[in-house]
Image: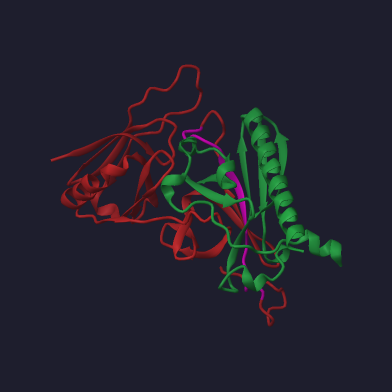
Chain colours: A red, B green
């Protein structure tokens, strides 16, 4: 038995597509036609074998509600554009076909810029209070640097305009103020993590 | 003394939204946007609309480089907040200090940056009025 959902965006793809799930895994392929004249690429079809799946979370996305799947070796997969009402059917489908529990997560809407960071398996999570605020998948990171006494900069991977499969504005760089990276017995003043 | 204090911001409790359902529908475009009603800048981060209240915003800059317009938003950090102990329950709190975004849509980026600056000016003016009334 296969279950499918339409008009779903895969990892911020410009074009929507369809996801299908069966006992063997989960797949997505673009179904929307690219507008004439656009030079940007269409996302390749994507297949995730069942043995790759670790956990699944449901949260508010940009296009609607977002299914995020944590995988063993393929990072985090983001599928955005579900209706709020699809939660139960998706939860049942994931549970019945892939033995995966769908966990609902509410994100912080406070608008604060301070909190704490967690390094999880596939991504860095910035939390505000007890709730996640945003995530940075490691696959999106090009480089990171210690730029000041208590500052860390993260550079993001960018796509050239003609190669771009994703839509919207691109994050280029983020800087974090991280107290406690300075230790008194470290003459450089900076403790290295690696 | 006075001048230095004016450059710093006191921490006040604030909240952009109570619930996720209050986010404006336009967040679907994954573009940086301004929501005047909630005094909030919404920034797309890894596919998620993330609100930042105007009180958390310090200043910003705009750069044109090739076919792209870059917007850099700077947020308040402990060096810009007086009474920093009140800013967070946890003194080890980490801060998002800045975020830079880019787009080829120069007109929209220029307009968004203008609206962010106007919203900040307005918020600062109201805060000033509130202080004067309190004195």
Quarter containing the C terminus of chain B: bottom right
Reply yes or no: does residue A3 show up in magenta: no
**A51 displayed left or right of B101:** left
Image quadrant of residue A6? top left
Number of numbered discs overlaid on the protein picture: 0
Residue drawn at x 60%, y 74% is B91
**A140 displayed left or right of A149:** left
Residue drawn at x 72%, y 78% is A187
Foreground residue among B54 and A152: B54
**A11 displayed left or right of A128:** left
Extreme residue in the bottom direction: A185
**A180 displayed left or right of A129:** right
**Residue A120 visible to an observer of this rendering:** yes
Indicate the position of residue A118 as horizontal and vertical percent values: 48, 65
Foreground residue among B122 and B76: B122
Reply yes or no: does residue A170 show up in magenta: yes
Region of the chain picked out in magenta, as a range: A164-182
Extreme residue in the top direction: A36
């Amino acid at each position: 038995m296969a279950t499918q959902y339409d008009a779903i965006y895969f990892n911020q793809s410009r074009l929507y597509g369809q996801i299908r799930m069966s006992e063997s895994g989960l797949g997505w392929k673009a179904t929307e036609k690219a507008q004439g004249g656009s030079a940007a690429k269409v996302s390749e079809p994507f297949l995730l074998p069942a043995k790759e799946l670790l956990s699944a979370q449901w949260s508010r996305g940009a296009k609607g509600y977002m299914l995020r799947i944590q995988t063993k070796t393929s990072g985090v997969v983001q599928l955005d554009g579900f209706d709020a009402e699809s939660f139960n059917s998706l939860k049942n489908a994931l549970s019945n076909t892939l033995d995966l529990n769908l966990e609902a997560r509410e994100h912080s809407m406070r608008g604060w810029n301070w909190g704490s960071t967690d390094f999880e398996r596939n991504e860095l999570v910035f939390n505000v209070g007890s709730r996640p605020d945003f995530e940075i998948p490691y696959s999106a990171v090009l480089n990171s640097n210690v730029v000041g006494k208590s500052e860390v900069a993260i550079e993001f991977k960018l796509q050239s305009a003609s190669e771009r499969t994703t839509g919207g504005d691109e994050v280029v760089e983020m800087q974090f103020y991280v107290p406690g990276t300075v230790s008194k017995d470290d003459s450089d003043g900076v403790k290295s993590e690696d | 003394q006075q001048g230095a204090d004016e450059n710093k911001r006191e921490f006040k409790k604030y909240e952009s939204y109570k619930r996720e359902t209050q986010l404006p529908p336009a967040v679907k475009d994954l573009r940086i946007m301004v929501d005047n009603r909630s005094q909030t800048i919404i920034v797309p981060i890894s596919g998620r609309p993330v609100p930042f209240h105007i009180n958390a915003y310090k200043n910003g800059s705009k750069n044109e480089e090739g076919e792209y317009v870059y917007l850099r938003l700077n947020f308040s950090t402990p060096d810009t907040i007086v009474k920093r102990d009140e800013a967070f329950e946890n003194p080890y709190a980490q801060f998002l200090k800045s975020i830079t975004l880019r787009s080829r849509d120069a007109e929209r980026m220029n307009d968004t940056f203008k609206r962010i600056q106007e919203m900040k000016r307005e918020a600062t003016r109201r805060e000033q009025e509130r202080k004067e009334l309190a004195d």
